[in-house]
């Protein structure tokens, strides 16, 4: 690992100065687009989505596998210009797993400095402690059916505040019971809002809704608005 890091530094050191500066101030981006926020507390607001390329996880229900690779290296200044061209207040940095790129922290800070209402969608597997405190963190906790449950980083929970949200994508009864247990243990006393969302096409939404009502859980049930409107289309 160290040798790979050192060889990256050697490669950057050997680049012409302007090219090295471009690489260090750039992020690999899959797409930047305007849509409606489909989930979380900002649901329904016109929002610019900045989708970063790459993710170290492989959730079974992933709907953005097209962001695992490819993308284009874009300087943070240019990303800010592209966001600004859409003329809306809400910006959502998503992926992939945005925090897998170190430059994401700087991008979030620059967006907050421009007074956008910035949210970050993150898998819950990577450390969120360096994320700017002005950012609304929407953090997944991966359920068993995702196949990535062992990657949950429960230490992140202590970094969450009132404006942040924890999201569970639920595909079956096992996921539901697991999420309920996490809610009653690891998330006990946490001020963040808890979101339970049915996994698209894996469970009928009303079944999850009925379980939540039956158990009177203090969670917010949510449907992914963008999928109701446009199905599973990328960039919507
Ligand atoms: S963390 Fe998100 S982008 Fe990564 S595999 Fe899971 S669902 Fe897909």
Image: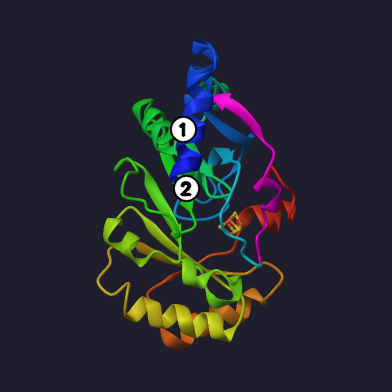
Of the pair 26 and 163, the residue shown nearer to us: 26
Specify start and end residues of the magenta stretch as a single range. Answer: 61-76
Q: Is residue 64 within the magenta segment?
A: yes
Q: Residue at x 61, y 35 (%)?
A: 29
Q: Are marks 1 and 2 in contact (CB under 8 Å)?
A: no
Whole-percent x, y for residue 164 in the image:
36, 54
Q: Is residue 50 above or below residue 182?
A: above
In this rendering, does residue 217 appear at all? Answer: no
In this rendering, does residue 198 appear at all? Answer: yes
Q: Which mark is residue 89?
A: 1
Whole-percent x, y for residue 10 in the image:
49, 27
Kindly identify which residue carries mark 2: 1
Q: Is residue 86 above or below residue 56?
A: above
Find out if the beta carbon at label 1 lies less than 8 Å from the nearest ligand 1 atom: no
Q: Is residue 22 above or below residue 31?
A: above
Q: Using the numbered discs, state the Cα–Cα distance from disc 1 to disc 2 in whole angstroms.
A: 40 Å
Question: Could you classify mark 1 by the number of other residues whose Cα lies within 10 Å: few (under 14), some (14-19), or many (20 or more)?
Answer: some
Quick check: 214 left or right of 109?
A: right
Whole-percent x, y for residue 233 in the image:
75, 49
Whole-percent x, y for residue 78 in the image:
54, 20
Q: Quadrant of residue 156?
A: bottom left
């Amino acid at each position: 690992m160290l040798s790979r890091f050192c060889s990256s530094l050697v490669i950057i050191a050997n680049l012409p100065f302007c090219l090295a500066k471009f690489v260090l101030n750039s992020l690999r981006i899959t797409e930047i687009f305007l849509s409606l926020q489909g989930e979380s507390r900002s649901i329904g607001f016109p929002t610019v989505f900045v989708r970063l390329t790459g993710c170290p996880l492989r959730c079974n229900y992933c709907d953005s596998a097209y962001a695992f690779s490819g993308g284009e290296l874009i300087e943070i200044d240019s990303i800010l210009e592209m966001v600004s061209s859409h003329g809306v207040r809400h910006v959502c940095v998503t992926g992939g797993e945005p925090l897998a790129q170190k430059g994401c922290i700087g991008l979030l800070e620059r967006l907050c400095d421009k007074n956008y209402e910035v949210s970050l969608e993150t898998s819950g597997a990577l450390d969120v402690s360096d994320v700017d405190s002005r950012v609304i963190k929407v953090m997944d906790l991966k359920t068993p059916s995702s196949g990535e449950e062992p990657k949950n980083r429960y230490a992140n929970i202590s970094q969450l505040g009132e404006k942040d949200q924890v999201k569970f994508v639920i595909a079956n009864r096992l996921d539901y019971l697991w999420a309920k247990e996490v809610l009653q243990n690891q998330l006990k006393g946490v001020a963040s809002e808890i979101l339970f969302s049915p996994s698209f096409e894996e469970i009928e939404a009303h079944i999850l809704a009925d379980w939540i009502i039956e158990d009177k859980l203090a969670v917010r049930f949510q449907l992914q608005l963008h999928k109701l409107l446009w199905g599973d289309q990328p960039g919507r």
